[in-house]
Amino acid sequence: MSDAVLDRMIGSYMATEQPTYSFGWQGGEPTLMGLDFFRKVIDLQKKHGRKGAVVANGLQTNATLINEDLASHLGNYKFLLGVSLDGPEHIHNHYRITVDGKGSHGRVVRAINRLQRHRVEYNILTLVSTANVNSPAEIYRYLVDRGEHYHQYIPCVEFDEQGQPLPYTITGEQWGEFLWGVFSEWIKEDALRVSIRHFDSILTLVVDGYANVCSLDTNCCQYFVVEHNGDIYPCDFFVRKDLSLGNIMSSSWEEILDSTIYREFGKMKSQWNEQCRNCSFLKYCAGDCQKQRYYGSEDPRTLSWLCDGWKSFYERSLSEFQRLAQKVKQLRSRQPPVTAPVPVPPELPGRNDPCYCGSGRKYKRCHGR
């Protein structure tokens, strides 16, 4: 991304009215840009930000290039990282190898140690592929035993040009069994101390009645992707020529928001298969991410590749989620009502820590929004 595109992207976005200015830096591998790029990012955010503006930077990485200097910078400016770690060494190294054919597990663990030294907040991102889909309990216990309490499990679903699954793609049935395997470990004693993103989102849906992740929502107008040349798209899974919304160098955010292509793309999320309309679990999956519905067809009404797995998981887990939701409501009810503005502490909590106001929510979901 050139300096001109970066400046325009940050400047134009921060000229809009937002409660929090959220930037998600992804690739490929974003740390290939190097420390100077991320220094420039902060300089531009300071340049264009109004006094008192809240900025949140997220970065998704395989962590192999994170050195002490980069970790220090990320910690100083409170970046929230998603670090890819697919399990213990013998599992992680199955697919995650370097150009010289060596496994990357050791490098990732050393990078995590650097992040911890510099107090960088991070979540673990575990890609669930054919290499680890049959080891849910082993992976979960490995992460928890390492002290990792923020997990995100991502199904690996990719197809070739003919719509056929690639060798590392998991089936719906495998996905359901994997989720149940993780859930069975988590629900024993970890439900209130280990955060698993999708489980948290289900609880939010049951307790508060809204979707806090795009895959559970009924509309895909959620965010924008800006490519290195300034081209804008509605989703990182749909960077396609026919879904181009404009270019940051010539288009305003108002024009992009009002784009017919953007609005129509968003509506496609709720163009479900007829089976979905009659499914008792539709509320909890919203037809799944559109990415999982495009294989061998461009019809959004195609059933999610993972549909059988979601059904299997919800059939076994939903009653437990509902019981847990009642427990969360009870815990909230015991907290005293807030009758006056809560003073902001001198040092703000981390984004994944409990909010200082006592709501019971994470800071990033409460006063850190």
Image (cartoon, rainbow, N blue to C red):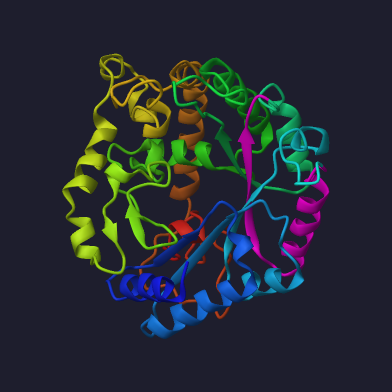
Residue at the image point whose x is 72% and y is 27% from the top: 137
- Residue 156 position within the rendered picture, expressed as x and y whole percent measured from the top left: 56, 31
- Residue 297 position within the rendered picture, expressed as x and y whole percent measured from the top left: 34, 22
- Residue 1 position within the rendered picture, expressed as x and y whole percent measured from the top left: 47, 66
- Residue 60 position within the rendered picture, expressed as x and y whole percent measured from the top left: 57, 54
Asked whether 104 falls inside the magenta stretch, the response is: yes
- Quadrant for residue 38, please give it: bottom right
Residue at the image point whose x is 20% and y is 41% from the top: 264
Residue in the foreground of this view, choosing between 201 and 84: 84
- For the C terminus, the image quarter is bottom left
- Which residues, given as a range, are shown in magenta? 102-130
Q: How many marks?
A: 0
Looking at the image, residue 25 lies above or below residue 300: below
- Quadrant for residue 311, please give it: top left
Residue in the foreground of this view, choosing between 199 and 134: 134
Asked whether 91 falls inside the magenta stretch, the response is: no
